[in-house]
Amino acid sequence: MSFENIEVTQNGRLAYIVINRPELRNALNTETLQEIVSALHLLERDDSVGCVIFTGKGEKSFAAGADISQLKDKTALDVFNPNGMSEVYDKIERFDKPTIAMVNGFALGGGCELALSCDIRVASTKAKFGLPELNLSIIPAAGGTQRLARVVGKGIALDMILTGRFLDGEQAERIGLVSEVVSPEELEEKTVEIAEKILAKGPLAVKLAKLAVHSGFETDQKTALIIEKLAQAVLFSTEDKNEGTTAFLEKRKAEFTSK
């Protein structure tokens, strides 16, 4: 399947979704978001793909937010568009396979929210994170007011949103917005290193760990612990659990089959 606004490539079990609008700092217009959804559908059905990495084309920008030329014409009812930016990011967060944001430059507005919807964020020292929507008299409404507060805490989230200040990669790491920050030259190597560690785990366990964390975070701890137990109960009944424990005892590499 060919795309105009993104590139989709694969290297082994790693798939890359690359926003390919460098002349516009990889701004996220409606067409780009629709292509991301199409790419996710393809990758979800592809058993050869174990992890998806999001990044932006070029060296300057991961994604510099929504396309302002389209944003200007939005009306109240557009907020409820089932294919809007918020819904696309919900799909990324709920995606069965692990996702990593490889942030190589500007991640502003909707670009920052895209990174927040991924499971893990790795940043270059040249990355810039920010939610400047209030300058346009709107709010970051593709998860920015919610996911950011859950990741870095309410106080820092309010600071970033209300002031619109930008954070570089090292500042983002200090507040927990990203898990790793490295030089631009090391960014892809570090991202692949993290992805490979995930791919070495039991794929069913990866899927259910994601489900338990995301679902449990949205409820009280007692209910979350029940979700955790049920996920573990499912895993205890799998062939992969038997393979993983046997391989450990036999001091060999496990061969998982997702069964």
Image (spheres, rainbow, N blue to C red):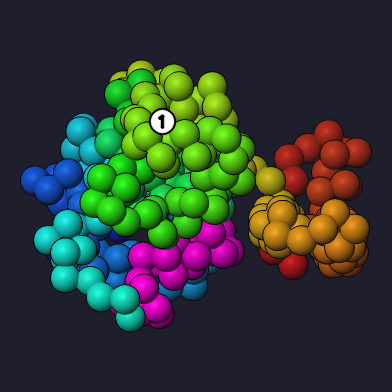
**What percent of the width, then of the height, locates residue 243?**
82, 53
Q: Is residue 6 magenta?
A: no
Left or right of 39: which side holds 12? right
| Percent of width and height locating residue 165 | 35, 31
The percent position of residue 150, horizontal first and vertical second, equals 61, 46
Q: Mark 1 points at which residue?
A: 123
Which image quarter: residue 87?
bottom left
Specify the quadrant that holds the C terminus: bottom right
From the top left corner, tell me how far across and down residue 93 is, in percent: 53, 59
> Which segment is the magenta one?
78-97
Q: Is mark 1 on a helix, strand or loop?
A: strand
Q: In this view, does 126 lie to the left or right of 23?
A: right
From what the image shows, is residue 166 above or below residue 65?
Answer: above
Q: Which residue is drawn at 57% across and 44% down?
A: 149
Image height of 221 relative to 58, above or below? below
Q: Residue placed at 40% from the left, 78% from the top? A: 80
